[in-house]
Image (cartoon, grey):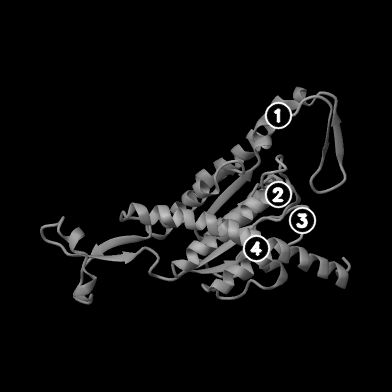
């Protein structure tokens, strides 16, 4: 494969810089909405909130005692602490496969954009809570070997890297080069099942907690097309024309249901959380469920 020309690199960098503010704004909005809701509820425990209780010990300062919670127990004092008190490295990845560029609504997000928003919003939540993030998508370029970072600059660099990645014919979840506290993969997972499940089996075999987010467009669920339609393969030149698209609707739905059903069965057998998210639904709902899934792994 030939190296990119300087002009191509310059144009790519300019395009990335142009999209970066919008990505950060969308991600900030989603993360802040979830944070506001979590703090507004002010409940202890894991999942969508950010603190929990543990018994007081002689090593704790008396100023850390939560007297309101302690009053509920006749014989025990409690200390309130953040759920994420122990810093960990979370590996994040958002797919760049050609199929992720699809968006049926010109005024709505593509699957790739929504996946990027979710990934960056999660990175914001994690770093604000003291965690470190590692961009697993950089592994193909040899840049994934670091220890992870929890700085604001790390989130910016992560967002820039997501935008700069070129579309690929297929994009399997990358292997982590080091042990991680949690791995999050976001994709439509429309890759061929054999290599996809083989890769996921390898990753799951490492024993590292893994969470998947499957992104879809509403048109992929409903297949609302009718009449004469031209369909083109996302990665390639293959085209097919249906004189009556509605006539293949049932066959399409059955094939898609079977594909996702196989993935769901795989995840169910291995205890891997698999979240489904559609781009016409609020991103905050998916981010909340994703944060809860990660919290469940961290505090079992």
- Can you tell which quarter of the image residue 59 is in? bottom left
Q: CA distance from mark 3 to mark 1?
A: 27 Å
| Residue highlighted by disc 2 | 100
Q: CA distance from mark 1 to mark 2?
A: 19 Å
Please indicate, yes or no, whether residue 190 appears anywhere in the rendered image. yes
| 64 lies left or right of 107 | left
The label nearer to you, 4 versus 2, is 4
Residue drawn where x is 86% and y is 73% of the image: 6
| Residue highlighted by disc 3 | 168
Q: CA distance from mark 2 to mark 3?
A: 10 Å
| 96 lies left or right of 61 | right
Q: Which mark is residue 224?
A: 1
Secondary structure beneath dot 2 equals: helix
Residue 165 in the image, given as x and y percentages of width and height: 73, 62
| Residue highlighted by disc 4 | 21
The label nearer to you, 4 versus 1, is 4
Residue drawn where x is 78% and y is 26% of the image: 245
Secondary structure beneath dot 3 equals: loop
Viewport quadrant of the C terminus = bottom left
Please indicate, yes or no, whether residue 205 appears anywhere in the rendered image. no
| 199 lies left or right of 287 | right
Q: Is 187 or 272 nearer to us in this picture? A: 187
Q: CA distance from mark 3 to mark 4?
A: 24 Å
Q: Is 65 or 134 nearer to us in this picture? A: 65
Q: Which mark is residue 144?
A: none
Q: Return the disc, 3 or 1, that comes first in the chain's sequence.
A: 3
Q: Return the disc, 3 or 4, that comes first in the chain's sequence.
A: 4
């Amino acid at each position: 494969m030939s190296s990119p020309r300087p002009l191509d690199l310059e144009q790519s960098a300019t395009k990335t810089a142009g999209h970066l503010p919008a990505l950060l704004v969308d991600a900030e909005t989603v993360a802040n909405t979830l944070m506001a809701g979590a703090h507004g509820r002010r409940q202890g425990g894991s999942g969508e909130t950010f603190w929990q209780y543990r018994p007081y010990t002689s090593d704790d300062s008396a100023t850390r005692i939560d007297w309101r919670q302690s009053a509920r127990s006749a014989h025990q004092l409690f200390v309130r602490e953040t759920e994420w008190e122990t810093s960990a490295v979370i590996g994040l990845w958002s797919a760049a496969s050609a199929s992720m560029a699809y968006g049926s609504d010109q005024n709505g997000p593509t699957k790739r954009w929504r996946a990027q928003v979710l990934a960056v919003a999660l990175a914001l939540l994690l770093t604000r809570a003291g965690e470190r993030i590692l961009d697993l998508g950089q592994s193909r370029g040899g840049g994934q070997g670091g220890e992870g970072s929890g700085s604001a600059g790390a989130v910016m660099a992560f967002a820039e890297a997501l935008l700069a990645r070129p579309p690929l014919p297929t994009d399997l979840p990358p292997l982590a080069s080091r042990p991680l506290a949690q791995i999050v993969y976001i994709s439509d997972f429309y890759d061929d099942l054999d290599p996809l499940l083989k890769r996921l089996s390898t990753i799951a075999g490492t024993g590292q907690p893994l969470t998947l987010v499957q992104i879809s467009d509403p048109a992929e669920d409903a297949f609302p097309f009718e009449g004469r339609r031209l369909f083109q393969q996302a990665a390639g030149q293959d085209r097919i024309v249906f004189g009556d698209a509605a006539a293949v609707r049932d066959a399409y739905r059955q094939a898609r249901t079977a594909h996702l059903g196989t993935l769901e069965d795989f995840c169910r057998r291995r205890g891997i959380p698999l979240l489904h998210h559609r781009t016409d639904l609020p991103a905050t709902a998916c981010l909340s469920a994703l944060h809860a899934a990660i919290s469940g792994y961290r505090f079992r």
